[in-house]
Image (tube, grey):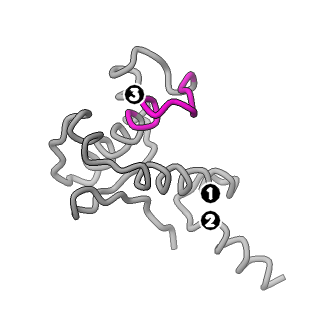
Amino acid sequence: MMKKLEITIDGTTYPCSPTMGAMVRFEKETGRDVSSMNAGSFTDLCTYLWCCVVSACARDRVKFKMSLLDFCDRLSPDDLAGWSEAVNSRMSDGDGSEGDGDGEKKSQEAST
């Protein structure tokens, strides 16, 4: 089963997915394509994370009304690091799906 990415802000859990809508929102917010995002920039990472939450909430019909700055005010460095790690883990799976990372690979290796 696919595990959805989520983030908890102020005790409320929101869906968080790197969707096409998130990419469009990032470009509208920054004036730059997501492919030019600087992975070392906290501003870029926070902005993209916010875009991912806004887009996933719109898709899942979850109420989310935080502005980018309100979101950043409530986001801790641990929240950002956890999200970044989850996305990187998912990307390293090679399929880009919302899987649960190495757990799926280990179970497949154990069955061979």
Q: Which residues are magenta?
A: 36-47
| Residue 24 image point, x, y percent | 39, 27
Q: Which residue is mark 3?
A: 26
Name the kind of residue labelled 2 in the image.
Answer: Gly
- Of 14 and 39, nearer the camera is 39
Q: Are marks 2 and 1 in contact (CB under 8 Å)?
A: yes
105 on left or right of 70: right
Residue 47 falls in image quadrant: top left
The magenta stretch spans residue 101: no
| Residue 9 image point, x, y percent | 27, 56
Among numbered discs 1 and 3, the one appearing first in the sequence: 3
Name the kind of residue labelled 3 in the image.
Answer: Phe
User: What label sits on residue 101 in the rendered view?
Assistant: 2
SS type, badge 1: helix
| Residue 7 image point, x, y percent | 35, 57
- The residue under the point 46% across, 34% down is 42
Q: Residue furthest top?
A: 31
- The residue under the point 74% across, 77% down is 108
